[in-house]
Image: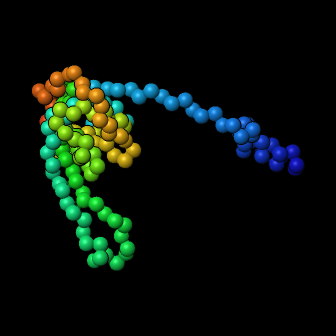
Amino acid sequence: MATRSGNRQQANTGGANTTGTAAKPAMRKPVFIKVDQLKPGTTGNNLTVKIVNVNTVLSKKPRNPSSLRVPARPQQNTRIAECLVGDETGSILLTARNDQVDLMKPDTTIILRNAKIDMFKGSMRLAVDKWGRVEVADPATFVVNEENNLSLVEYELVNVEE
């Protein structure tokens, strides 16, 4: 009986290094793609794009917190802007939220990390949520291809019967 429990304990450790020095997994280099490679429903996209124009869609003040029964945390204004961004292969609408709106200025080059594609009324929109990152980069030399606007392509959800 004692050998069985001893084996069980050894199996639970999984042969892990018990000296206290755990090896860190190596970080992978990000793979950057072009705008024309974006597909509906994808996540984890890394892009370098230039901002063509910015359109503020919503700038709303928070509700009165004293009307709520639960003590609320301090709230800030909700801001949403739609920005046409792109590279030499195409363009797409980027939905910028709150602090991201401050970075959006025309002719600025930005790096989007871990961006995702949201579907809005059947068309693709690029968005960066709390797991992603928006960084201002050095000015790029490419000219944005506004002719290939991926947000103008309308998609339809089709159920496939098996």
11 w.r.t. 76: above or below? above
Residue in the picture at 24% in, 31% down: 109
Residue furthest to the right in view is 2
Question: Viewed as shown, does residue 56 lie left or right of 63?
Answer: left
Depicted 155 relative to depicted 147: above or below: below
The residue that appears at 83% across and 45% down in the rendered structure is: 6
Q: Which residue sits at x=21%, y=63%?
A: 61
Residue 39 seen in the current view: no
Tell which of 112 and 15 is nearer to you: 112
- Looking at the rendered structure, the number of numbered marks drawn on it comes to 0
Q: Left or right: where does residue 11 sit relative to residue 152?
A: right
Q: Position of residue 143 (x, y in %)?
A: 17, 23
Q: Quadrant of the C terminus?
A: top left
In percent of the image, x 75 and y 38: which residue is there? 19
Q: Is residue 17 visible?
A: yes
- The answer to which image quadrant residue 111 occupies is top left
Say which of 151 and 106 sits in front.
106
Q: Quadrant of residue 103?
A: top left
Color scheme of the displayed model: rainbow
Q: Position of residue 78 (x, y in %)?
A: 24, 57
Say which quarter of the image contains residue 123. top left
Q: Residue furthest left?
A: 147
Q: Extreme front residue here?
A: 138
Residue 98, position as x, y percentages in the image:
27, 51
> How far from the left and from the top, in percent, is residue 95?
23, 44
Q: Nearer the viewer, residue 42 or 109?
A: 109
Residue 144, compared with residue 94, is above or below; it is above
